[in-house]
Image (cartoon, helix red, strand yellow):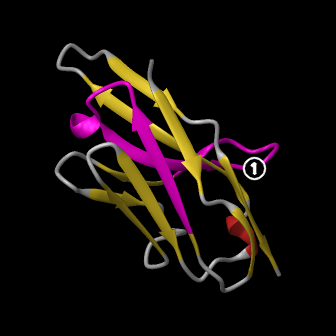
């Protein structure tokens, strides 16, 4: 059974830091692109950052230079610095693999809430 379990969310003051963790189990995730997405009520889920098996990273412009994504074989982390109230959201971990035939395996965690007070 595939599981992605996030931790590390919480309440922090503006300018503070948090480190999110996501532990994946049930598959070999070394070939998966792992990522963090976030969503606030009433808005679409948005990409925060991704990291592939080769450690290549991609960031939303809104978090670049403040957030850093990293990974192990079966875990992905998000170091969030200089947090702003607009970073408040439910942060979810994602694991995605796109096969040569176009099929996509997509797995999600339950999410961890991040709240930044002004």
Which image quarter holds the N terminus?
top left
Which range is magenta?
Answer: 19-47
Q: In this view, does 110 lie to the left or right of 23?
A: right
Mark 1 crowd level (few <14, some 14–19, many ≥20, 10 Å Cα)? some
Measured along the vertical axis of the image, is residue 94 above or below residue 51?
above
Q: Mark 1 points at which residue?
A: 40
Look at the numbered disc 1 and give the secondary structure of its residue: loop
Extreme-bottom residue of the structure: 15
Residue 85 location, x and y as percent?
A: 75, 73
Q: Residue 118's x, y, as percent?
A: 83, 81
Q: Is residue 13 above or below residue 5?
A: below
Q: Residue at x 20, y 13 (%)?
A: 101
40 or 107, nearer to the observer: 107
For the residue pair 108 and 102, the one nearer the viewer reads as: 108
Query: Is 62 or 32 nearer to us in this picture?
Result: 32
Q: Is residue 41 magenta?
A: yes
- Among the 4 quarters of the image, the one containing residue 74: top left
Q: Where is residue 98 in the image (x, y as percent from the top left)?
A: 28, 26
**Residue 108 on the magenta segment:** no
User: Left or right: where does residue 7 sit relative to residue 64?
Assistant: right
């Amino acid at each position: 059974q595939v599981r992605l379990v996030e931790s590390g969310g919480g309440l922090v003051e503006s300018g503070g830091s948090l480190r999110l963790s996501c532990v994946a189990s049930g598959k070999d995730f070394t070939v998966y692109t792992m990522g963090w997405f976030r969503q606030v009520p009433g808005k679409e889920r948005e990409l925060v950052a991704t990291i592939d098996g080769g450690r290549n990273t991609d960031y939303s412009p809104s978090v670049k230079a403040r957030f850093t994504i990293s990974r192990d074989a079966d875990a992905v982390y998000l170091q969030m610095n200089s947090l702003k109230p607009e970073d408040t959201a439910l942060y979810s971990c994602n694991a995605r693999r796109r096969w040569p035939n176009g099929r996509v395996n997509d797995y999600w965690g339950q999410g961890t809430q991040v709240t930044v007070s002004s």
